[in-house]
Amino acid sequence: MRSDARFYKDINEFYEIALPFLLKKEVENGLQISILNSLKNNIEKYGKEAPILCTVSIDDEIKLVSLRTPPYNQILSYTDELKTIDVLIDALNKVKPGIPGILGFTEGAKRFSKLWCKRNGLKSKIVMNERIYKLESVAEDTLGNKKFIKATDTYENIILQWGRAFMLEALPDRAPEMIERSLKHFKTDINEGRIFLLFDNELPVSMARKAGKSPNGIAVNAVYTPPHLRRKGYATECVAKSSKLLLEEGNKYCFLFTDLSNPTSNSIYQKIGYRPIMDVDEYHFFK
């Protein structure tokens, strides 16, 4: 068997070649698919540095897709051919991209981290254990009766405040400049009607965001309730209503990532109707 890795400079070419493979496991590869869609629309969506786009094939059949939008981590698609990860590492080492970390399905991320660090004299630490969930229908008893809106720029200040708090809480290792870059996306999302707010007594109490799109699904992320308003069911109702709206917009399913160290959020999502699909781990590399 012949294995080889190929890098791409043209996002349109990469999209046409990689997407059919990614769609074989659409939910598992939802993050990569949504990133590809964003890059296709705006190649500088995540920064001015060119993205690293790669496929690994065995006997001319794609078995792994990997991409990176600097300064963020390398991302692995799902693959049942783990040896393709070794081929990817050989190829990446030749282009010396200075990878800060890896995000991928548990077994693949572990293999990449171990071999990458061995080859490059680095150490690694696991910074997040996550689980991908999928929802096709919302449990009616989670919808509640509180006011729910697509946010307008009237609420920009509180959304940016909550967005910063969300990232500091969910991603404590993220560099300040990356947080500021992400906050710019929140401003765009407000203008595009992608931020949802739940209200109680006419005050916003919880937030969720419509995120990346795949052909059949849509991601929900940035779920945030301020600490003093938690344990009141606000996040449950906000995510339930957000998910229902997104299904009504024509999406066949919603998907999201949860932090496995937070049993509360995992319980909330399952109550709404989300079902576990695959576990994903994130590693950071250091000297």
Image (tube, rainbow, N blue to C red):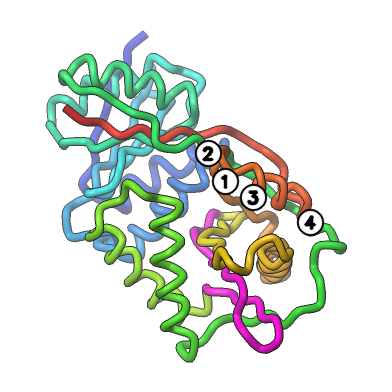
Q: Is mark 3 in CB contact (under 8 Å) with mark 1?
A: yes
Q: Secondary structure at mark 1?
A: strand
In the image, residue 130 sits, relative to residue 272, either above or below, namely above
Say whether disc 2 or disc 4 marks the residue closer to the N-terminus. 2
Q: Is mark 1 in CB contact (under 8 Å) with mark 2?
A: yes
How far is disc 4 from disc 1 in space, using C-alphas? 18 Å
| Residue 136 x, y percent position in the rendering | 75, 53
| Residue 11 x, y percent position in the rendering | 29, 52
Q: Is residue 7 left or right of residue 78?
A: left
Q: Is residue 16 magenta?
A: no
Q: Is residue 202 magenta?
A: yes
Q: What residue sits right under mark 2 in the picture?
A: 130
How far is disc 3 from disc 2 in space, using C-alphas? 11 Å
Question: Observer-nearest residue: 271 or 115?
Answer: 271
Q: How many marks?
A: 4
Q: What residue sits right under mark 4 in the picture?
A: 137
Residue range highlighted in magenta: 195-214
How far is disc 1 from disc 2 in space, using C-alphas? 5 Å
Label 4 or label 1, whichever lies nearer to me, is: 1
Q: What residue sits right under mark 1 in the picture?
A: 258
Q: Is residue 249 left or right of residue 210?
A: right
Q: Quadrant of the C terminus?
A: top left
Q: Quadrant of the N terminus?
A: top left
Say whether disc 3 or disc 2 marks the residue closer to the N-terminus. 2
